[in-house]
Image: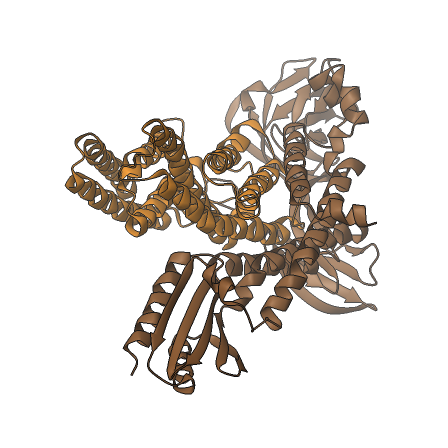
Amino acid sequence: MKALIKFFSSVKLAIFLIIIIALASLVGALVPQERSPDEYFARYGQLAHFFQIIQFTRLYQSWWFLSLLFLLALNIIVCTLNRLSPKLRRAFRPRLEIEAKEINALRIKEKLKKDMALAKAKQGLKREFSLRHYRLKEEERENKVFLLARKKVLGLFGSDIVHLGLLIILAGGIASGLAGFKENLTFREGEVLDIPKAEFKLRLDKFQIEYYPNGRIKDWKSTLTVIENEKPTLSKVIEVNHPLSYKEFVFYQSSYDWDWTNVSLEVWARKKNDSSFLKTIEAKVGESINLEENIRIALSQFIPDFIIDEKNEVTSRSLQPNNPAAFIEGWEENRKIFSGWIFARFPDFSRIHSEEEMNFSFELKNFTAGQFSVIQAASDPGVNFIWLGCGLVMTGLFLAFYWPSREVRVILEESQKQTEFLAGGTAAKSREALEFEFKEIMGSIRRMT
Amino acid sequence: MIESTLFFVTFIIYIISALFYFSFLFSKRQSLAAVGFRVAFLGLSIHTVALVMRTFESGHAPFTNMYESLSFLSWASMLAYVLIEAKYKIQKAGPYFMLIVIALMALASSPLMPKDTSPLVPALQSYWLWLHVSVTLLGEAFFAVAFITSIMYLVVAAKEKRDSGEKSGLSAEKLDSISYRSIAVGFPLFTLGGLVFGMIWAYKAWGSYWTWDPKETMSFITWLVFALYLHTRIVFGWKGRRSAYVAVIGFLTAIFTYFGVNYLLAGLHSYA
């Protein structure tokens, strides 16, 4: 046990672990994480299998990476506790009576004699320190006074507070990893969905996409209503960067999706022998509409991203409307007279096949599809630890770098109506600044009458 | 329009400042360094106006694409240098540091970086954009100062050793201490802007504060390298050469985080 504590109290171990963790993280940044086995094989060939065995492909969740973090945490705990108790003693129960040689060993020191009584010398000295916001402790022995003047004592604990913050962040990370939950919910307008693991439901009242003038997406906005015990309790419009928090859950506007099962089309029909003829057909996919007295046109299929694959079959390359296309059919009584694809982006590419001479041409002018709002539901019990930890880390860094503790010790000794001052100072950082202050104080003592 | 003119003027002024600093380096006339500093300060002021104009022209924070971000990083580096020089009088670092600023400005003005303003994608519409990016880049600017003073340390220390301890104007010891002081400013800023603000924003926009996205991971590694710098220095008492190497590695990691990730590794941070 002792050997173990000794092992973990070494800063060398910390340095070693930091280097290993940095290198491991680098591997994780260079090897894409959590992809399909096929992708890894394409990237790394024979190495792919090896990478998967040593978990390079899900490195940050791997047992060995987590063990490294765990070892570092243990290391931080042992190191910090080791240093903490002497520091606490120094801060709260400092030894006041010290030997002259201890002061003489300091870098900043001075010795001088004044023709005055001990009590008066002490009073003058204390005033000088108080003027500079030092806090004082003293102890008297016969003809001696030991004075300890300090300020910004909290600065001593900067690094400990940083370390405590880091441990709390790690604890938060563990809590998030074990008990956090995240799921995408796909809503249609008006739809009510159960929230997994929650005792309430969520309704999407309205979903809006806002565009910039150049057509790029500006924002997605979903009006959500929380329904608890069949009663609406809270409504909020959420958008990216402005989620809805309710109980332990947070709902984020994550993205949107097209509902390609519910599409309406606008098709323009023209006649080749009559340029004044223009008919606008507006209908849902699957419906048919009369074009002329005995000719019906059916909008039988819609594809958002038209492509012909290697098997020579029509398919959609993606779920985004990159190349919207509609398949239309013309019917005269029960006889199909023409059919073919028309393209919204490429009107000239329309391919209408017909047995006879075609008198019509068609253009796919517009389409509207229903949209899903994709909302991410998440609950993360670790997150408050994270914010607490971050706060402590920042406080600790500030204290460590910009709140340098200073300590000045003085031994006053009276002999033959003279008082001898032996003073020395220590500073955690910015020794020059303390030196300057120290000289000022000693200068005032010298001038004291 | 005004912004691009001001940017160009700033670029020219930085070059003039560098010329003064370099002639100081060769002629050893102190007054030339003082002129270099004033010219750099003038450039910084015009650059500030340029960034403000950019904000008004685009309607959002001036660091949403590579051009804006490089321009802001050169501004932050110039600011960091001006502050450090004013406080510690390290004119000799001026010429070398100006090279970094000019390199960043040159990269920003390269035709590879589109200059037009474009509206923000939904994820970037947040005041955290201001806090996260500006504080992080300011932190990295102080790492850049430490990088230059550390490299100068390595050169000057070797020279002092050769000339058996004879010290010229800017001693190796002072360079070492300025490297440390720059990191003492840069490290808290980088921690606050890059990691803490980054986590808060990620939580608000993406629903999780940490996803091991390549940019996050590289920032974490940068943070570890500087943590290493501080621990070896404060606990082991490393100083001088070894500390300088760690500071150089730290800055290179930060630069890779800034550039490399965008061009080499895909991830959530691939905006612009």
Image location of residue B76, percent across then percent down? 38, 45
Asked if A323 appears above or below A281 in the picture, the reply is above
Image location of residue B271, percent across then percent down? 52, 38
A420 and B271: which is toward the camera: A420
Q: Is residue A336 visible?
A: no
Asked if A44 appears above or below B47 in the picture, the reply is above
Chain shaded brown: A
Q: Quadrant of the C terminus of chain A?
A: bottom left
Q: Residue at x 38, y 29 (%)?
A: B158
A114 and A125: which is toward the camera: A114
Q: How many marks?
A: 0
Q: What is the residue that sits farthest to the front in this orientation? A: A416
Chain shaded orange: B
Q: Residue at x 40, y 75 (%)?
A: A420
Render colour scheme: by chain
Q: Is residue B51 visible?
A: yes
Asked if B44 appears above or below A344 in the picture, the reply is below
Image location of residue B39, percent across then percent down? 20, 43
Q: Quarter-wise, where is residue B33 in the image?
A: top left
Image location of residue A224, percent across then percent down? 69, 59
B21 and B217: which is toward the camera: B21
